[in-house]
Amino acid sequence: MRCLLKALSVVSLHASLRRSRQLCSQSSSAQTSFSYELIKQQYRPEVPEYFNFASDVLDRWAKVEKEGKKTKNPALWWVDGDGEEVKWSFEELGVLSRKAANVLSGACSLQCGDRVLLLLPRIPEWWLLNVACMRTGTVPIPGTQQLTAKDILYRLQKSKAKGVITNDSVASTVESVEADCQSLKFKLLVSEGHREGWLSFKDLLKTAPSDHRCVTTKSQHPVAIYFTSGTTGAPKMTEHSHCSYGIGLTVSGSCTFNSLRHCVSAGEPINPEVMAKWKAWTGLDIHECYGQTETVLVCGNFKGMEIKPGSMGKPSPGYDVKIIDENGNILPPGKEGEIAIKVKPTRPLFLFTCYTDDPEKTKATVRGDFYVTGDRGLMDEDGYFWFVGRADDVINSAGYRIGPFEVESALIEHPAVLESAVVSSPDPIRGEVVKAFVVLTPNYVSHDPEKMMKDLQDHVKKATAPYKYPRKMEFVRELPKTISGKIRRNELRQKEWRRY
């Protein structure tokens, strides 16, 4: 499934970004090798007091189309697994999103500032309804369709959402919890056919008028709320503004083309072994990036940069990223600490606004002059950042600090290991030691566990510093993960410590 959303090219609003892209397009390797520094220096986004992506970007491109100036690509180009396509011009997306906005403000009775849970797969209606929410000032709360009834109940109760927008695959799950959600006023179904108790989006869209006046929103007005992945606790509501998402994403937004040319990864660090195999199979490098629900893109291996396998690259333009200690002091290259973003004297435009309805947790993210990510890492002499692990995941064994990722990276190099999760385990002498939960590849599941453990321990001792090897190991069929696919190391760690 592919989507091309050219509307992210808000070049007319951000002259500095246009200059940055020109620098990126320099052809010679000598030029591109230093273009990152030029881009970072020149990146000065212009943020107006009022901004709304629907009116200020989408509708402007639609006007260009009406004036007869051909645009290179459609506004949205969607292709499903069977090759079926949906192509919308900017004018078509404009008309459809205005009709959808009238559905939200009419039949659904949503007002500016109201929240709605949006549980849809990557179908055209997902983008259509997001734009419609911008037009009405409604705040969408996007979520994956893999959410369980417990997940949906938590999100509806926590957010006090007025409605749910989903399709048939999730409708019954919503129905199972709706009686406990007092704020829920409507359920909108984006599927063919009808369902009792649900409004039909397709029917309402057909009869909705195409005229709609977009609400006026300030740049800092909330545009969306995302629940964090919840790897270390209950998911938090992370609020982003029209500025942080509508403008902030221009630094990383790009179109998807029919042929694979550029590979980007995020979410979980990629082991160097995996990157090498990908390069061997495709001939392409993986440009690893790092960010959070709260931050958009923090660091990345941008085009024109030398890639250091395992590194998350250099800071994104718009962010001043440092490694700091527990007192908020900046640490020198090579010294491990917490990954932090400078927020004083000026808070970055693209950082999340707050944890919704939770000022204490919002306040706790600031240490001195910095927003603290909760992740540990280090910066090398060349300015590249390296991820060590979540602050809670780092293992302190007999005074040695050991990041789980480096042990997992060593383990994945062994052909017997499909995936692994490394956590601390209590030890009477060292305080805590490294324990690895390992999922074996099919060809090795029948091997003797004691011998396999010894083989893997010896392998880690050779692949990294010997003191980092897992002194304990447990072979499992699968690892606990969040809805977004991140390993829940905290769950394994808590389970491990409860044993003793």
Image (cartoon, rainbow, N blue to C red):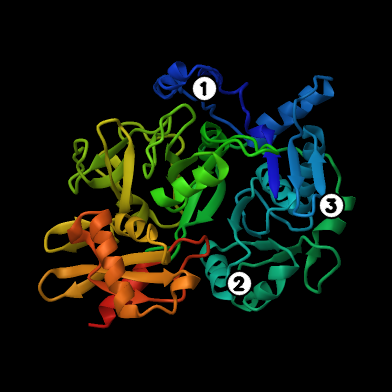
Say which element carries label 2.
loop
Q: Position of residue 368 (x, y in %)?
A: 23, 42
Identify which amino acid the numbered label 1 is placed on.
Cys
Identify which amino acid the numbered label 3 is placed on.
Leu
Say which element carries label 3.
helix
Which is nearer the eye, 415 or 144? 415
Q: Is residue 114 visible?
A: yes
Instruction: Using the image, tell me which numbered label, if any, was put on residue 205.
Output: 3
**Quadrant for the C terminus in the image:** bottom left
Instruction: Using the image, tell me which numbered label, if any, was put on residue 182.
Output: 2
Say which element carries label 1.
helix
Instruction: Using the image, tell me which numbered label, if any, was put on residue 372.
Output: none
Which is nearer the eye, 25 or 471? 471
Q: Residue furthest right?
A: 207
Quickly name the residue at label 1. Answer: 24
Q: CA distance from mark 2 to mark 3?
A: 27 Å
Q: CA distance from mark 1 to mark 3?
A: 42 Å
Q: Residues within 10 Å of mark 3 (few under 14, many from 20)?
A: some
Sooner in the amino-acid sequence: mark 2 or mark 3 = 2
Instruction: Give above or below for 143 relative to 154.
Output: above
Q: Is residue 372 visible?
A: no
Residue at 81% over, 45% down? 86
